[in-house]
């Protein structure tokens, strides 16, 4: 593998800009779509969450398929960029259809079927974009420092996009509930405006970036063993455990914080989300500094005990107390959660390297597909359980006359448990997974060294063979 610089600054910035979709669209939907369906469109919580769950499961199932399709694609512009380009042209249209103001329709079932249909269409286009894009993050350069830099830049853009795509839509939702704007204005701002915001960088990436990893001559075969082969890699299994704990926690937190801020803390959704995202952005310079000098698993796990303790405090915070205390606890949660939030996709290329050393082929798309498959499947079930808990706890849906109804104590308790309980359990499991993760920075460096020797066809002398055997024993 070359150690020469391969990317110009403008290409790094352009590629990183593409994660306004990966971070922003996911965050916007995670925060607003369930409450949009329940409180704006007027669908029962369990029915709305069921539609989301089915769509997410389809999204998850399609990810490994897309991974193998993109692994096997050969075009003059590469195997990832064609899908990002086409998806970029389509995503704005499909995204806008998700937010059509269909609240006047009489049937809950009809509204749920429409929501399910458009969400499944969106999920399909999202998969066509997201799997090649995440795969390209491991292939846009073969220089490890450039790869770390571009992935940190990508995640910085993603987090900034999360800020934009949660704070502004949350403010728009607050304005809608306060009667300051109409539902049609809400649609134009969220559905049309953000759809265009997500589409533009993807189209530009399709035209103006490059793929630099040498492609294997042999293509993958479409069968189950191809889907699951990344799971043979111990380091990748460990990464999945860490990623699932972090991402599902974030999904439930994002879906629940709107309900929590409106009905439990009686504070501002925009302030809660702004604190959480703002702390993440402030942590980026430190994370960028540490990523090349401290083991990534340590960065992931170090702050989790603080995050868990603080968010238990958020969940148990008395409704009658000043909301400032809940804001402060949220800030401490975000501070402790920052390492876990930022590290999974930075670790991903290292896990792919380990997979290439073990499996010989570099099937990055399959790794990306399996990673997102497991995440989305688990997330789908988690969001459904959250919606079901709302229904079972007696959650009262808003009406045109009463936009913010007084919820029974059972619904308040359900919101608290669904958020704080799930976060505590999942992040405890994530902490354990990180402590047991086998890829240290030193081992990742050794893996890249042996991959380089393999590519060059250099035979291993006795000393190198001994080092290789010890590495295999530690990570496989």
Image (tube, rainbow, N blue to C red):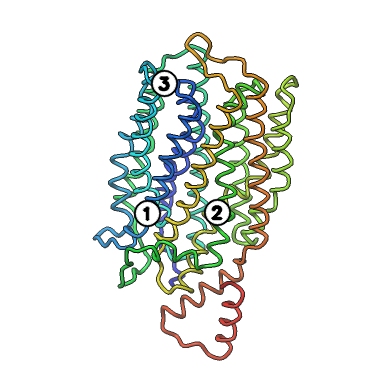
Residue placed under numbered mark 2 in the picture: 344
Report the disc number at residue 132. 1
Residue placed under numbered mark 3 in the picture: 186
Q: Earlier in the sequence, mark 1 or mark 3?
A: 1
Q: Position of residue 193 (x, y in %)?
A: 37, 28
Q: Are marks 2 and 3 in contact (CB under 8 Å)?
A: no
Q: Position of residue 169 (x, y in %)?
A: 48, 27
Toward the front, the furthest residue is 392
Mark 2 is surrounded, within 10 Å at the Cα level, by few (under 14), some (14 to 19) or many (20 or more) other residues, namely many
Mark 1 is surrounded, within 10 Å at the Cα level, by few (under 14), some (14 to 19) or many (20 or more) other residues, namely many
Q: Earlier in the sequence, mark 1 or mark 2?
A: 1
What secondary structure is found at the residue carrying circle 3? helix
Tell me, yes or no, if residue 89 can be seen here. Answer: yes
Q: Position of residue 147 (x, y in %)?
A: 48, 60
The Cα atoms of the two marked residues, 2 and 3, are separated by: 34 Å
The residue drawn where x is 73% and y is 28% is: 317
Side of 374 where 189 appears, left or right: left
Q: Position of residue 428 (x, y in %)?
A: 68, 50
Q: Earlier in the sequence, mark 2 or mark 3?
A: 3
Mark 3 is surrounded, within 10 Å at the Cα level, by few (under 14), some (14 to 19) or many (20 or more) other residues, namely many
Toward the bottom, the furthest residue is 462
218 or 9, nearer to the observer: 218
Tell me which corner region of the image, top left, top right, bottom left or bottom right, holds residue 213.
bottom left
What secondary structure is found at the residue carrying circle 1? helix
399 or 307, nearer to the observer: 399
Instruction: Please state, as top left, top right, bottom left or bottom right, where the N terminus lies in the image.
Output: bottom left
Instruction: Please state, as top left, top right, bottom left or bottom right, where the C terminus lies in the image.
Output: bottom right
The residue drawn where x is 62% and y is 63% is: 437
């Amino acid at each position: 593998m070359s150690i020469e610089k391969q990317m110009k600054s403008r290409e790094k910035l352009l590629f990183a800009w593409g994660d306004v979709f990966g971070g922003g669209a996911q965050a916007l939907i995670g925060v607003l779509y369930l409450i949009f369906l329940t409180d704006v469109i007027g669908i029962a919580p369990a029915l709305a969450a069921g539609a989301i769950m089915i769509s997410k499961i389809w999204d998850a199932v399609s990810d490994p398929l897309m991974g193998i399709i993109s692994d096997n694609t050969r075009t003059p512009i590469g195997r990832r960029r064609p899908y990002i380009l086409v998806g970029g042209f389509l995503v704005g249209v499909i995204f806008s259809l998700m937010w059509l103001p269909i609240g006047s329709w009489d049937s809950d079932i009809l509204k749920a079927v429409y929501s399910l249909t458009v969400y499944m269409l969106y999920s399909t286009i999202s998969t066509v974009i997201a799997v090649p894009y995440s795969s390209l993050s491991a292939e846009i350069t073969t220089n490890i420092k450039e790869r770390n830099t571009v992935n940190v830049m990508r995640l910085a853009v993603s987090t900034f996009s999360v800020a934009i795509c949660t704070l502004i839509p949350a403010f728009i939702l607050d304005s809608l509930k306060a009667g300051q704007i109409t539902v049609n204005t809400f649609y134009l701002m969220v559905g049309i405006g953000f759809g265009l915001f997500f589409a533009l960088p993807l189209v530009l990436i399709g035209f103006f970036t490059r793929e630099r990893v040498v492609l294997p001559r042999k293509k993958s075969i479409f069968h189950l063993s191809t889907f699951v082969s990344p799971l043979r890699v111990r380091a990748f299994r460990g990464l999945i455990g860490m990623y699932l704990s972090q991402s599902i926690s974030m999904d439930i937190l994002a879906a629940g914080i709107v309900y929590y801020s409106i009905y439990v803390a009686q504070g501002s959704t925009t302030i809660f989300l702004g604190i959480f995202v703002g702390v993440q952005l402030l942590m980026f310079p430190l994370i960028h500094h540490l990523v090349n000098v401290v083991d990534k698993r340590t960065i992931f796990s170090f702050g989790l005990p603080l995050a868990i303790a603080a968010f238990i405090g958020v969940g148990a915070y008395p409704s009658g107390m000043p909301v400032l205390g809940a804001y402060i606890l949220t800030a401490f949660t975000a501070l402790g959660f920052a390492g876990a939030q930022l590290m999974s996709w930075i670790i991903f290329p290292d896990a792919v390297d380990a997979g290439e050393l073990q499996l010989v082929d570099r099937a990055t798309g399959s790794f990306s597909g399996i990673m997102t498959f497991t995440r989305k499947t688990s997330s789908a079930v988690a969001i459904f359980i959250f919606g079901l808990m709302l229904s079972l706890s007696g959650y009262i849906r808003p009406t045109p006359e009463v936009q913010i109804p007084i919820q029974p104590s059972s619904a308040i308790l359900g919101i608290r448990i669904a958020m704080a309980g799930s976060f505590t359990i999942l992040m405890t499991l994530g902490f354990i997974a990180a402590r047991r993760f086998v890829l240290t920075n030193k081992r990742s460096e050794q893996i890249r060294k042996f991959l380089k020797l393999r590519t060059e066809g250099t035979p291993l002398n006795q000393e190198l063979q001994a080092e290789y055997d010890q590495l295999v024993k530690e990570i496989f």
